[in-house]
Every structure is written in structure tokens, then in C-alpha cells.
Image (cartoon, helix red, strand yellow):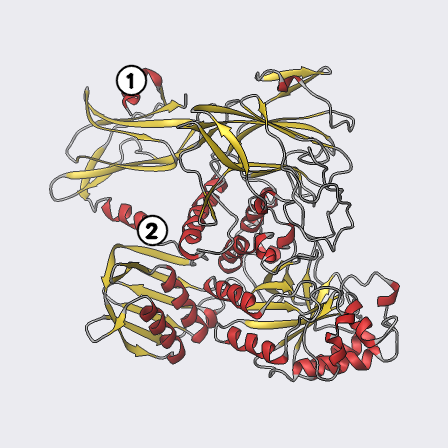
Amino acid sequence: MKLIKNTKFYNRLGYVMALCFMVTFHGHADVYQNGVLEQKYPVIPTPQKIQYGKSELSFKAFQIVKTDFIGESNQLRAFFENNGISEGSEGIKIQMIQEHIPVHNADEAYKIQIDSEIKIWATTAKGAYYAIKTLQQVFRQQGNFGVIPQLQITDWPAFKVRGFMHDTGRNFQSVAQLKEQLEVLSQYKYNVFHWHLTDDPGWRLESKLYPQLQNEDATSRGKGKFYTQDDFKEILAFCKARHITVIPEFDIPGHSRAFRNAMGFDNMRDERALPALLDLFDELMDLASAEEMPYIHIGTDEVRNKEEYVPDGFVKTIMDRVKSKNRELIVWKEGIEIEEDSTSINQLWAQHTPRKGHRFIDSRANYINHLDPFAGMARLFFQQPTRQPQGDALALGGILAAWPDNNVAEERDILIQNPIYPSMVFYADAIWKGRAENKLEYWAKLPPVGSKELEEFKAFEDKVISHRDLFFKRKEFQYIRQTNFEWNLIGPITTDGDVNLSFPIEDSLINSYKIDEKEYTWSQPIVGGTTHFKHFFGFPAITTEQTGTFYAYTEIYSPDDRVQDFWVGFQGWSRSGGRRVGPFPDQGQWHTTNPKIWVNGTEIAPPVWKQPNLGTRTDEIPFIDEDYFFRAPTKIALKKGWNKVLLKIPQDKNSWKWMFTCVPIHLEDGAVKEVKDLKFRAVFNTEPKVSVTEFPKDNQLYARDAINKATITVSGIADSTVDSLIVKVHRDKNVVTREAFKANGAFSIPLEIEALKHNYTVELFQKKKD
């Protein structure tokens, strides 16, 4: 920080204040410590109300001195004992108290108070269970001790339905792999598992009435793989112990090829089809009571082939049968609409809206197979479930859905080739905490540098990184910090669809260019791991143009010469619909639009593809290395110092997505992590900016403590172009306090001064990055 002392490098922001001090001062140390504890013990989903205390609590033993929730207290006992904390009369005291908490969705609400002991209050066992999940998140093991922070929480969910769906009809997953994911869902307070059990490739639930449904001739993928009725009951019991409700789905009359093949029906109009389906739904409902399995999903979506068409009354008859067994009925929307149906729950997908007066579950824009590990997480964070702040009698909640339609080679590929676990964590916050607004403008891009919304995303990202490292060891978690990756963009330059055109940007880097009589200038800095120029579903992005060429530029500082692993990609394959809007590129291409990347003037070669030049309709050929996050990283040589990185990203009318990803990664025991000693910087249009959020006011009065000391605070947000800041406090001509510090986004600096009758001048200076 020596350079900071030379004030000629700073631009004064012009804050001059005269200050007086009086009454009692309480100090800033508590606030600072609260912030430290919040960073060290992040809770996801974010509680509705949370206040961290001043210190941590260490203990070697525990004692449950009171409980109104036997099952949940036994789970807490097992958790502590599994982490080396024994039960004993000298241990920390724990009370679990049943008490009505008068908040929204009170049956799932809870309160926690941790000071010298632990107290939990909950309206029902569900709330007590969620309190334990929160307690587990803030527990740390240090040697033989358990450590937890002092805190107070009052918490409840914004929505009643907080769900996750897997399509096991197309691609079977073992009971063990499902349980692994259900355990994670329970840690993040999900309460619904939507189990899509049937689709064209297979009918995955054993039927003792129609065992031919499991015949290999009826199954086109995963032959011989299905869930026995005992498997089904095992998952039900596993979920029940975690307060998760299973919603089974038999999707009919569309997506029914396996059913038709097994039963020998040419089409769904066969007179034997309806009686067989009524038997199958009866058999399903006989596996669990209406209390344990209150919802039945009958699909009805995408009936687009003539062999799937059904006569009038077909779907209505199934609806009536399901409701006669005291079950709530769920259908997809868009799906077959029955005029007489006034009670079904609509599960929304794509951009469909619910039928008037119908309850609904929101799965719009929530298909993980379409989500990029970076850009997709912004969408999950900024979207507002059901498009309202909290649920009500009609808006029940949302279900995050995984539809890897394409055939997979191994069941683990579902987790490797889709950002399942990161999506669970990001969506958990939105569906539990709720969102005050739906910020569609950030569904496909991160907010502007220096904005309040970006700072909110950064704060949550910090929590996600902490959880990744604490709770997802040996699990596929394809996310690293992305808010420090800075880029300038220029374009789109008109190409008339010719993706091979070159432009002066490739020869020299200057502020602006004149090409074909049109002026092109580098953008303000943007941040993000993946940039969508034009989003494939039409969400607001960088441009509305359909074709052209963009360039992206950044500089990366490396402390040494090295060969660095990078994730590099120019097309996100959606893991559905084959190689959607293919074909896949040939050898020597990053993508069919011929994008390029240069580092320090050297072009970086694309991977040697294992399956080059595949066409679009290749649903049955599993993915291997198509996307950047499930292939071997690209090796790129970096020199010591600043490295120049230039990307060219053309687009024509044949490619579905216009995007790029270029981020350094560190692989550690199979897990992807940040490369902490590399620094990004945008170099064009980077005027330093500091937004001040707290600063002393003219003639402001300050409290003092017993020894006549007072604390003033200077807070704000420094954007990525600011290197460092100085705060000076003057009395007369003398500097009485001076703080210099590196800028890193949000800052808050407490300054101690004498609270006597003096006039003070406070100044803030900034230094731009070199």
C-alpha cells in the first residue's frame, strides 16, 4: 500500500464535514463481529429474520433438557454424535418447544436462539426439522469441540410447495443416486419430490397387474431398469422422514410409447387403453395413503402425435378416478384442458399461464437441462417464483425440473452434465425466502457493475461458495465465483451471415473502430462467467440483433509463468432435443460459427472432439465432451504479468445460442475451484466509481463512550476499476485518523476519534487501477 500515500494519485471526492459529539456511544465492534460471524456461518436459504450475535459457542457435549418433538430431537442427537459430540449432563442445554409462530405458512415456521444454550421453537414437527437443518449448517467441528455462533432466527417459507423433479422415465436413476439428491434437497428445506416415472423410453414403476410394462421390448433405454414397488415405498419412507412429499407422475396420453409398446396398442384410442390406465393409477394409489401421497400427476402435456390422441372423456375419466381416491390432481399447463375441470393444479412450464381460478405450481424457465452453470444461476437468483412475493391460495410455489431428454451413458452423467446441485442451492433461496420483484432483465446477464443488484448477487455468491466447500465434497458442483470476471464487449458488427469475416479488432486494440461507415465502441465493463449476447428463449440480453460478430476482451494478471486450466465454450448444449439446432462442430472448430480465442496473440486450438460433426437428431447418442464443464479443461499458457485475452464470437441463422464462456479453474480432488491468484480487469471505459452509502453529515451529532471516544463510519461500494481508497479525518491542520485499504466491492470503515468539542473534516480519496 506504499503507493497510496502519494495523494497525487487520488481524486478527491469532495466530502468536507464539521462534526460535534455528545451523549452515549455504544461502539462499532459488535457490528463488525456480527459481520464476521455472518460470513463464517452463512445460512441458505436466507432466513426471513436473522441476527448474529457477538461471539461463538464451543462445546464438547450436549443435553436435550426439553423436547416436544421426539423424532426431530433424535435426529439432532444423531447429528451431534456422528460429529463426535457426546450427550452428557455437563453439555450445552437444548430445548425444543412446540409453540404457534404467527407468521405466513406457520406450520413450517421455526425460531432459533443460541446464546449460552440452544432453544428451538416450532409450530409443528416440520418447523422443528427445518430448525435442525439450519443448526446443522452453522455447526463447525474444531478438534474435539463443536462450535456454533450466537444468533437469533425467526423463519418461515414464502411458498408451500418447494420442489424438485427428476425425469426417470427417459433415464433411470438408481435408488441410491436419488437418495443422495433427496438428502441435499432436505438440507435446503425443499419439501416436494416430483417423480416423473413414465415417458417414451420406459415405464419405470413395477406393475403387478401388467408386468409386461417392464419387458425389454417395451423399453428403449435402460432395458430391465425399473423401480420395484418396494423401491417406491423405500423412497416414500426416505422422503417422509425428511418432510418431503412425493408427487408421482404417470404422463399420459402423450409420452406413452413405452406403455403402448408393452400393451400392444397401436394408439391411445384403443378401447383397452383407458381401463388399463385406470388400473395402473389405482395400483399406484394403493401403494400409499392419501395422507402420505396426497398428489397424483397425470401429465397431459405435448400430445402432438396422432397415436397419442384420445377420445372425448378419456382424460376426464382418469381425473375423476384420481379424485375419487381423495387425491389432489396435477396436470401440466400447457396440456389437455378439460372444460369441466375446475379443481386441478396447473404445473406451468415454458411461458404458460395458469387457467383462471386454478391453483398452480411454477416450473417456468426452471429446466436445469437448459441452464448454463453460470448464467443459469443468475436466472434462478433473480426470478420471482409465481411472479409474486409469496404464495397464496392459488400460487402454491415452484418445482425445479431436470429434463435431460437425451440418452445418457451412465446415470452419474445426469449430475455431471447438468448443474443439478448448484441449481438446487440457488433456487432454494428464491423459493423459500421469496423475491420482492421479478427481475427479468437479469435472467440472462448479471446486473451492471456497481449496482445494488450485483452486490446482492455477490453476497449470495459468497454464501454459495462457502456451502460448496463445506457441504458438497465429492459431489458435482459446477460453479465458481463469477462476479470478478470482467470483460469489455464490442459489436455486433454486421456480417450478413458470413461468420468468417475478420475485422480490425483482431489487428489492434483501440477505443473505437469505424467499419463500413458505422462507429463501434467498446462497452462498459461487464462481469460474469458466461455471457449471452442474445438469449435463446428471448430473455433480455446484450443485443436484439439476430446475427453479427461480437468481440470480447479482458486482461488477466498472473503472478508467474504457468499453463492454466480454463473452461472455454461457445455453445451451451441443452442436453435435450439431440444436439439442438446442430450440427455439432467438426474437428478444428470451437463451434459451427467459427469463434476464436487468442491469448497474447496466440490462437488457442479447440478440443479434439470425440464425436465431431453429429447432426441435430442424435438423441440416442450420449453426450461425452460437448460442453465446457464436462470435458477436459483447455490448457492455456499465461505469462507473468498481464495477459491479453481476445475472443471472437460470430453468429449466423443456423446456431441457436450466441454466447461464450472463458474462465480459469483449479481442479482439486475432482472438485472445481477458483484460481485465487489470477486477477481480471476490463481496460476500456473504466472510469473509477465509488458509491458512498454512509458518510458523516454536516453538524452531525455523535455519541461518546466513557472515555470520550466516538466512532464514525464511512461505507460504500467501489467498482472493479478502483484499486484502493484512503479516508482521512482532519482536525484543524492535523490528520488525526487515516485509513488506507484495498478496494474490493462493498466497504465499511469505522474510525475512532475524540468526542470532544472539535470540528473535523472527513475526506475520501480513490486510486484507479494501473
Specify the amino acid type for callout 1. Answer: Asn
| Secondary structure state at the residue bearing disc 2 | helix
Label 1 packing within 10 angstroms: few (<14), some (14-19), many (20+):
few
Residue labelled with disc 2: 40
User: Residue visible at 37% across and 63% down?
Assistant: 136
| Secondary structure state at the residue bearing disc 1 | loop
The residue lying toward the viewer, choosing from 58 and 597, is 597
- Compute the Cα span from label 1 to label 2: 35 Å
Residue 506 is at least partly visible in this image = yes
Pinpoint residue 412: horizontal percent, then vertical percent: 58, 58
User: In this view, which residue lies farthest toward the left?
Assistant: 707
Indicate left or right for 381 with 271 as reference.
left
User: Residue visible at 75% across and 41% down?
Assistant: 613
Residue 98 is at least partly visible in this image = no
Q: Nearer the viewer, mark 1 or mark 2?
A: 2
- The quarter of the image holding the N terminus is top left
- Residue 673 position by quadrant: top left
- Residue 511 position by quadrant: top right
Q: Quick one: label 1 or label 2, which is nearer the N terminus?
A: 1
Specify the amino acid type for callout 2. Answer: Lys
Residue labelled with disc 1: 6
Indicate left or right for 446 with 620 as reference.
left
Pinpoint residue 570: horizontal percent, then vertical percent: 64, 37
- Numbered label attached to residue 763: none
- Residue 628 position by quadrant: top right
